[in-house]
Image (cartoon, rainbow, N blue to C red):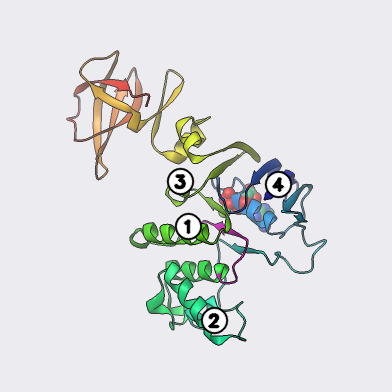
């Protein structure tokens, strides 16, 4: 189990993280979410032992993770960290990069292992390509495969799909997370994109104003967002009579007390997002088709 207790940290004077505590069971995936600058990357670096804490402790099972004051080499060997800015060896092939940390003693095993990882990150056809010729997204996939190569117990992924295009993203996420689940690898993912984690994380923490402001399952946080920041992670929402109501929970009905005037319809694929005025405030709701501007509609809040 990962156990983070009362962690506080600052680079200079201003606190970046204050009194952060959470736990994660082995084999689980934790999503770390928060706005840009909220300290997600810093938290991952601290978990990796890159800096000394101002206060608090980090334990993996019964091993304490300590910073550079106590360790010559950053990063315990049971842990791998894929930074937002991944560093690969540009002049060697994808396969060689993935195999960097694998022993040459059993060449056949090494080759099989590399092939397995190439399949997980969908790079088989690029196995012999030099890394410098790859796109940003392909490099990111090489970095992910390399992190998994030596079967770490725990991986820290910082915005792991940020460079990967939408064509590949969906299948890569599925493939990567099912691989980690199968291998019982504990995973911590920092992201600002709900689709990166919502289907895969068992737990989610939210960082805001140096503090951990929420810690729950993605489902619980979605159903009962404690504030606008949490709601905004999951999608478009409104505040009606002080309550957070997602755009997909506002429905057009024949008659209700909520009468709105439609302004604009935005095509979203399987629905339209409708912008309207309700009691002098802008609201958004989802609807199966376009609605003419200036139309009057009655809205109802779907509490499901
Ligand atoms: P996030 O990953 O959520 O965008 P970061 O952890 O990168 O946030 O940054 C948190 C805060 O720490 C920001 O205010 C950022 O400017 C600051 N920060 C990050 N790295 C450093 C550093 N190496 N030195 C000083 N300040 C830093
Ligand atoms: Mg970051």
Residue 3 on image: x %, y %: 70, 47
| Residues at discs 4 and 1 in contact (Cβ within 8 Å) | no
Quarter of the figure with residue 69: bottom right
Sequence-earlier tag: 3 or 1: 1
Distance between the alpha carbons at the discs numbered 3 and 1:
12 Å
Residues under numbered marks 3 and 4 in contact, where contact means CB atoms less than 8 Å apart: no
Give the left or right position of residue 69, taking residue 223 as reference.
Answer: right
Q: What residue lies at 44% left-to-right and 47% top-to-bottom? A: 199
Classify mark 1: helix, strand or loop.
helix
Q: Which dot marks residue 4?
A: 4
Q: Residue furthest left?
A: 292
Q: Which residues are magenta?
A: 149-162
Q: Which residue is mark 3?
A: 198
Q: CA distance from mark 4 to mark 1?
A: 23 Å
Q: Which residue is mark 1?
A: 177
Where residue 273 appears, x then y in whole percent? 28, 36
Q: Nearer the viewer, mark 3 or mark 2?
A: 2
- Specify few, some or many for label 2: CA neighbours under 10 Å numbering under 14, 14-19, or 20 or more: few
Marks 2 and 1 sit apart, C-alpha to C-alpha, by: 23 Å
Is mark 4 in CB contact (under 8 Å) with mark 2? no
For residue 264, above or below residue 72: above
Tag 1 or tag 4, which sits nearer the N-term?
Answer: 4
Left or right: residue 128 versus residue 109 is left
Label 3: state its secondary structure. loop
* Residue linked to disc 2: 109
Residue 217 is left or right of residue 129, and the answer is right
Q: Nearer the viewer, mark 4 or mark 1?
A: 1
Q: Nearer the viewer, mark 3 or mark 1?
A: 1
């Amino acid at each position: 189990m990962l156990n983070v207790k009362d962690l506080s940290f600052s680079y200079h004077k201003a606190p970046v993280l204050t009194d952060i505590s959470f736990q994660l069971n082995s084999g689980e995936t934790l999503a770390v979410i928060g706005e840009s600058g909220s300290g997600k990357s810093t938290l991952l670096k601290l978990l990796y032992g890159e800096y000394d804490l101002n206060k608090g402790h980090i334990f993996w099972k019964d091993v304490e993770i300590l910073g550079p004051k106590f360790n010559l080499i950053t990063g315990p060997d049971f842990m791998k960290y894929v930074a937002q800015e991944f560093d690969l060896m540009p002049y060697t092939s994808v396969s060689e990069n993935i195999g960097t940390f694998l022993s040459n003693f059993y060449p056949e095993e090494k080759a099989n292992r590399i092939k397995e990882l190439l399949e997980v990150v969908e790079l088989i056809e690029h196995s012999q390509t030099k890394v410098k010729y790859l796109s940003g997204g392909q490099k990111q996939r090489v970095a992910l495969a390399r992190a998994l190569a030596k079967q770490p117990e725990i991986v820290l992924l910082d915005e792991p799909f940020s460079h990967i295009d939408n064509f590949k993203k969906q299948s890569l996420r599925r493939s990567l997370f099912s691989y980690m689940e199968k291998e019982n690898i504990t995973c911590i993912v920092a992201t600002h994109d709900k689709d990166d984690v919502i289907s895969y994380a068992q737990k989610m923490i939210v960082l805001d104003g140096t503090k951990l402001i929420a810690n729950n399952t993605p489902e619980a946080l979605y159903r009962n967002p404690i504030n606008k920041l949490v709601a905004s992670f999951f999608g478009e929402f409104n505040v009606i009579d002080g309550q957070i109501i997602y755009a997909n929970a506002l429905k057009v009905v024949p008659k209700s007390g909520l009468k709105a005037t439609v302004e604009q319809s935005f095509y979203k694929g399987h629905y339209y997002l409708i912008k309207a005025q309700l009691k002098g405030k802008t609201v958004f709701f989802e609807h199966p088709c376009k609605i003419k501007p200036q139309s009057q509609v009655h809205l109802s809040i779907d509490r499901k």
